[in-house]
Amino acid sequence: MSSSTVVVSRSARRDRPRTPGAGRRRAIGLFVALIALAAAACLSIAIGSSTVSPAALVHALTTPDGSLTDQVVLDLRLPRTVAAVVVGVALGLAGALIQAFTRNPLGDPGILGVDAGAALFVTIGVGLGAMSALQMLPWAFAGALVVTAVVSIIGAAGRSGPDPVRLTLAGVAVGAVLLGISQALMLISPVTFARLRAWGAGSFVERGWDVVVPALPFVAAGIVVAFATARSLNALGLGDDLAASLGTRLVTTRALSIVAITVLAGSATAIAGPVGFVGLMAPHVARWIVGPDQRWILPYTMLLAPTLLLAADVIGRVALWPGEVPVGVVTAFIGAPVLIHLVRRARASTL
């Protein structure tokens, strides 16, 4: 049997369900994940400084009459919940794309410095007068694009080509430098950057419709591009040579992946600031459930990542009540042990 025949058969096995009932089970799993996301969203709207009963929640969402509870639900908690869902979807898909694109199981917008790059450029933009979310978005996109390109170039340097360890180390180093620069800029003019203090820790406090709505078209575009690359990313996981022999356009796939990562990570950072580890954890959970097929990993990640982020946000609200822990701090507490576990796994380098 020729090597090309072996390659094609491996790709075919990768793309199709392993058993006749696999597709059905995966579809059922998606439905369960959707129910979990809906439950997390309801908890996010109901839990806060004051708890909203299920009856009051239904009343506020269906027949609001302007009461204080209705105002709390519709003006504060609903946009915050939608922001968490949008950011979760964006970070989860960005993480899944980074892991597939770089063949690095530790890929994440935070770990690879993409969030830090977007945050630095947003900080610069605010210093130059960008105040609205719509004005911050181009700066976030530029920062995410620059850091993605720089880290990818550093990780691909050398005769051996892209290396997961080198990518991770480059991302951590670049992210630490950029984060330090961002903090230094904020210290130079505390008044100018006062509105970025909570945002810099990753937070959904005061994230209203004026922040969420401008980012929605860009997140939607990123989702479309991400799903358009799913089949090609499956082939790319076999290695560049094998993917090229199967007809995959490597340059196009990588370019589309970088565009999607830039738009998704930039939008998420513009909304909530740098929130780490969501893009690391959700794709791994999806991969454990459905295997290496990106056509299933991406939709699972779209549901699991916002569920995780909503849960972290709810935990942050009640952990130090009546105070609040930024969601970026909560995800770090959850994600750091997960990262250590992945690094220690014997097969952590495989995707």
Image (spheres, rainbow, N blue to C red):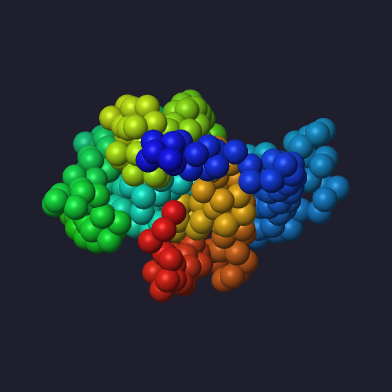
Q: Position of residue 315 (x, y in %)?
A: 60, 64
In the picture, measured across the screen, residue 192 lies left or right of residue 108, that is left
Q: Determine whether 170 is above or below 1 in the image.
A: below
State the image quarter where residue 85 is shown: top right
Viewer-proximal residue among 200 and 24:
24
Instruction: Determine if residue 288 is in view.
Output: yes
State the image quarter where residue 1 is shown: top left
| Residue positioned 29% across, 52% down in the render | 113
Viewer-proximal residue among 11 and 185:
11
Q: Given the current orientation, which residue lies at the most extreme right position?
A: 55
Q: Given the current orientation, which residue lies at the most extreme front position?
A: 1
| Residue positioned 27% across, 43% down in the render | 148
| Residue positioned 39% across, 38% down in the render | 2
Q: Position of residue 269 (x, y in %)?
A: 39, 44
- Image quarter hosting the C terminus: bottom left
In the picture, measured across the screen, residue 351 lies left or right of residue 160, that is right
State the image quarter where residue 346 is shown: bottom left
Q: Position of residue 38 (x, y in %)?
A: 71, 46
Instruction: Determine if residue 183 is in view.
Output: no
Q: Position of residue 27 (x, y in %)?
A: 71, 41
Counting every numbered tag in the picture gives 0
Viewer-proximal residue among 3 and 58:
3
In the picture, measured across the screen, residue 306 lies left or right of residue 236, that is right
| Residue positioned 49% across, 62% down in the render | 331
